[in-house]
Image (cartoon, rainbow, N blue to C red):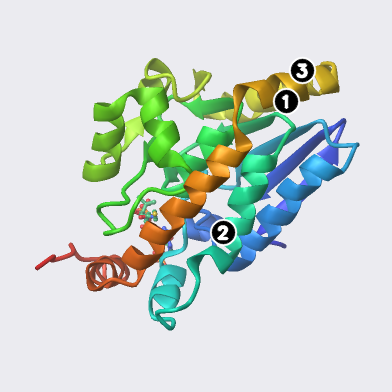
């Protein structure tokens, strides 16, 4: 079984993160496959809607921390922007089809910031969404430094980034981060139903509506500038300490 599965049904391209034993933490190989699927959503006329979901009890625990360690140990001139995650982020910024997400359990890091590029998000009432970039001594990514404060306001966004505590699906609904908060057992069916409704709407009208609401070039420019801060933090001693602390199941100690 592939760790990223895709299925096109009735105009809805469903992309499933399928690494449940690791809470769908995303590896470099998975980002490549996510990028391919997201690019396909824009180029394949049969795709009307893109739907992201996660297999198992979580949507995604974010970037694979083992990969962070490998990348952080790479030569200092290794270009963060060459990483597959950036191909995926560019594809997300450029995606002109509506994007829907079904979120249960944990949505951490890019598991949350990906949602800022979705047009409709259905979350479980008890889902836990977090963006613990500072806990990992990193920096915001995926244009979340722009989009999260735009949705939540500065203070709530700063708290999510800097203190890293999760908010549940009900709070995410109250804060405007998701469209629906439903019992966990209803998340997928609700998201599929909304995706199918979108797939039946006039495709050019939908595309133009989405294009008028977002500035893809600006989003990509911000993703790149965030990438420089993220890349230099990823190679920093404080981030290495945070990554090792996670793998050793202990609290990090920052000097
Ligand atoms: N990268 C690599 N492995 C991860 C991972 C990640 N981001 N998130 C979870 N895993 C692995 C765990 O190491 C564990 O592996 P093991 O069974 O071999 O020990 C397995 O997935 C299950 O995770 P576990 O921590 O036991 O589950 P939990 O329910 O107690 O906690 C999380 C779930 C998501 C809260 C916790 O795993 C976590 O905090 N993960 C890191 C999230 C993160 O910081 N992501 C990066 C954001 S930029």
Relative to 100, 223 lies left or right? left
Quadrant in the picture for residue 2? bottom right
Mark 1 closeness class: few <14, some 14–19, many ≥20 residues within 10 Å? many
Residue at the location (45% across, 25% down)?
Answer: 177
- Percent across and percent down for residue 205 are 80, 17
Element at label 3: helix
Query: Which residue was labeled with disc 2?
Result: 85
- Percent across and percent down for residue 43 are 84, 44
Mark 2 closeness class: few <14, some 14–19, many ≥20 residues within 10 Å? many
Relative to 154, 189 lies left or right? right
Residue at the location (78% across, 39% down)?
Answer: 13
Q: Specify which label sits upstream in the sequence, 2 or 1.
A: 2
Instruction: Decide: is 64 above or below 110.
Output: below
Relative to 163, 21 lies left or right? right
Contact between marks 2 and 3 (CB within 8 A): the answer is no
Query: Which residue was labeled with disc 1?
Result: 195
Mark 3 closeness class: few <14, some 14–19, many ≥20 residues within 10 Å? few
Q: Nearer the viewer, mark 2 or mark 1?
A: 2
Q: Residue furthest bottom?
A: 75
Report the disc number at residue 22.
Answer: none
Does the rendering let one see residue 57? no
- Percent across and percent down for residue 20 are 55, 55
Q: Identify which residue, 237 or 211, lies in the foreground.
A: 211
Disc 2 from disc 3: Cα separation:
30 Å
Q: Residue furthest right?
A: 46
Quadrant in the picture for residue 36? bottom right
Report the disc number at residue 197.
Answer: 3
Q: Specify which label sits upstream in the sequence, 2 or 3.
A: 2
Instruction: Decide: is 176 above or below 68.
Output: above
Disc 2 from disc 1: Cα separation:
25 Å
């Amino acid at each position: 079984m592939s760790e990223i599965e895709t299925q096109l049904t009735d105009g809805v391209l469903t992309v499933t993160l399928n690494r449940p034993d690791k809470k769908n933490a995303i590896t470099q190989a998975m980002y490549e496959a996510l990028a391919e699927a997201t690019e396909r959503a824009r180029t394949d006329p049969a795709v009307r809607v893109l739907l992201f979901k996660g297999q198992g009890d979580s949507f995604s625990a974010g970037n694979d921390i083992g990969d962070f360690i490998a990348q952080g140990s790479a030569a200092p001139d290794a270009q963060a922007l060459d990483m597959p995650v950036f191909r995926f982020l560019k594809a997300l910024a450029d995606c002109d089809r509506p994007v829907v997400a079904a979120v249960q359990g944990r949505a951490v890091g890019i598991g949350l910031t990906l949602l800022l590029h979705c047009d409709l998000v259905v979350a479980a009432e008890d889902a836990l969404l977090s963006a613990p970039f500072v806990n990992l001594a990193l920096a915001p990514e995926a244009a979340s430094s722009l989009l999260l404060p735009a949705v939540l306001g500065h203070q709530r966004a700063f708290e999510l980034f800097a203190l890293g505590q999760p908010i549940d699906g009900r709070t995410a609904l109250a804060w405007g981060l998701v469209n629906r908060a439903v019992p966990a057992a209803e998340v997928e069916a609700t998201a599929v139903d909304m995706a199918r409704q979108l797939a039946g709407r006039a495709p050019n009208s939908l595309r133009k509506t989405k294009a008028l609401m977002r500035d893809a070039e600006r989003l990509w420019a911000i993703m790149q500038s965030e990438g420089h801060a993220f890349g230099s933090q990823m190679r920093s001693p404080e981030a290495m300490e945070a990554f090792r602390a996670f793998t050793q199941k202990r609290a990090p100690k920052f000097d």
